[in-house]
Amino acid sequence: MVYKARSSSLTFAMPNTDLLARSHAAVWHPCTQMKRHETLPLVPIQRGQGAWLYDFDGNRYLDAVSSWWVNLFGHCNPRINAAITDQLGKLEHVMLAGFTHEPAVRLSERLAQIAPAGLGHCFYASDGASATEIALKMSAHYWRNSGHADKTQFISLQNSYHGETLGALSVTDVALFKDAYGALVKQNATVPSPDWRNAEAGERAEDFALRCAAQLEAHLQQHHEHIAAFIVEPLVQGAAGMAMHHPIYLRRARKLCDEYKVHLIADEIAVGMGRTGTMFACEQAAITPDFLLLSKGITGGYLPLSVVMTTDNIYQAFYADEVARGFLHSHSYTGNPLACRAALATLDIFAQDNALHTNRAKAAYFNGIAEPLRAHPAVRNWRNTGMIWAFEIEHTHADFAQRCFALGLQNELLLRPMGNTVYFMPPYIIGEAEMQLLAERTLKIVEMLA
Ligand SMILES: *Cc1c(COP(=O)(O)O)cnc(C)c1O
C-alpha cells in the first residue's frame, strides 16, 4: 500500500485511513525510514488514558515504553491536567531573559531540594539534546573562564547516547549516526562501557565495573589536560539496549574526575525522576555530579522541558562584569511556565503517592509474575533496575525488532525493541492486571519469534 496525498475535500472522510495517508504525506516522522510505513502502517492514536493508548477503531495498546520513556503517571492524568489548566489561565509563556515567573522559581527550588546535594542552579531548555549541548558548552566555558582554555575535549562511554543534535552526537556512540553524520561532528574519545553483558564468564558486575574504571583512569592520565568533561548515563545506558552497570563505576568515575580536574556530567534524561528506583540514579552511587541533566519524565511526559542542574562553583566562574564571561546560551521557550507547572505537579504526585515506595512493590510483583518469561530458553541477560526491564532474544529473523513491534500491536502491547533487545519501561501507574497482561502476552510473542 502506497499512501498518496489526498485533496482537502476528503479531510473528514474515514478518520483512520485518511489520517494515516495525510500523516505519511505531510509529517516527516522522527528517526524513521518513511518508506517502511508503506508496509508497516503508522498507528493513529485518538486518546490516552492511564497506561493505555486508544486508536480510532477501538483498539487499545498498553504503553509499555512510556511513549519513548517520558510518561510517568499515565496519559491524561487528572492532577497534571489540572495544574496545566490552572497555569493556562494565568500565564502561558514569558521570555526568561530579563523576566522571571513563579513556576520556574518554584521548580528550581524544589529540584535543588531533592537532587544530590550542591546542585543549586538550574538552567532550562526544551529537550534532552539541548541539555547535553548546554552541559558541554558550560563545562568548556567554565575551564576557559578558569584559565584552562585547552580543556575542550569530552569523553563518553562506548554505546553512549546523549541526543541527536551535532554537539550531542559528538558524545553519542551509535554506528548508524557516526556513518551518516560523522563528518559534521567533532571527534571525541570513548572509553569502555561497564555494561555487565560484556563481563568475562564468571566475572562479577562489580569487578567488571572496576576493570572499566581502570581503563577510564588510564585514559584520563594521558589526556586530562585537554578534557573538559566525562559524560555518562548513570546505571542504565538506555539507547545501548538498556545496558546496566554496577554503581561502583560511578563512584570511581567521580573520584577520578576530581583527581584529574575533569567535570562529571550525569545524563539522567532517561534514568532520572525515579526510573532506576531512586529519584536520581546518582543517589545509588552516593555522588554529586558537576552537571545533572533532566528531561523526558520531568513533566510527567506532558510538555517539552529540560534542565541542567549545576554547582555554585561552576555558577561563580561565570559571575562577573564582562558579558563574555557569562554563559551564552538561550532558547525561545526556556523555562516555559506550562511545562514548569507540569513538572511541579509531577513532583507533587511523587510526594502524595509515595511513588518510589510503591514502585518498589510493583517491581517486585512484576519480577514474580514474569518468571516464566525470564526462564524461557530463548531469553538472555534478563535484567532489571527500578522500573526498567530488558532482555535479549535468541532468534533468526533479520527484521526482528519490526516483527516484534507488529506482534506487540496485535496483542495490545506497545513494545519497541532495539535490535534483539526487548525492554519494558512502563508508566508508574501500571496496575497488577496490566503487568500480568504484559508478562503473558510478551511470553506469547517470544514463543512465536524464538
Ligand atoms: C532521550 C535522551 C536524550 C535526548 O533527549 P531528546 O529530548 O530526545 O533530545 C539524551 N540523553 C539520553 C540518555 C536520552 O535517553
Image (cartoon, grey):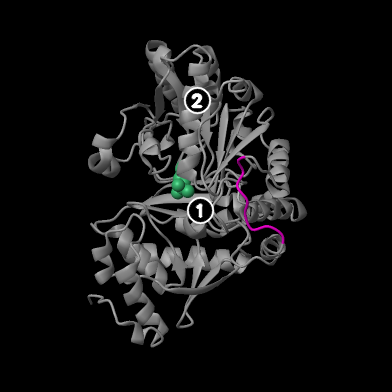
Give the residue pinned by disc 2.
139
Query: Which region shows up in magenta?
Result: 90-97
In the image, residue 439 sits, relative to residue 188, either above or below, namely below
Please tell me how crowded label 1 is: few (under 14), some (14-19), or many (20+) other residues with Cα within 10 Å: many
The answer to whether the beta carbon of the residue marked 1 is less than 8 Å from any atom of ligand 1 is yes
State left or right for residue 449 relative to residue 202: left
Give the residue pinned by disc 1.
69
Q: Residue furthest right?
A: 352
Residue situated in front as seen by the camera: 410 or 105: 105
Residue situated in front as seen by the camera: 130 or 390: 130
**Image quarter hosting the C terminus:** bottom left
As helix, strand or loop, the secondary structure at mark 1 comes to helix
In the image, residue 137 sits, relative to residue 58, either above or below, namely above
Residue 238: x %, y % from top left? 45, 44
Residue 272: x %, y % from top left? 58, 43
**Image quarter hosting the N terminus:** bottom left
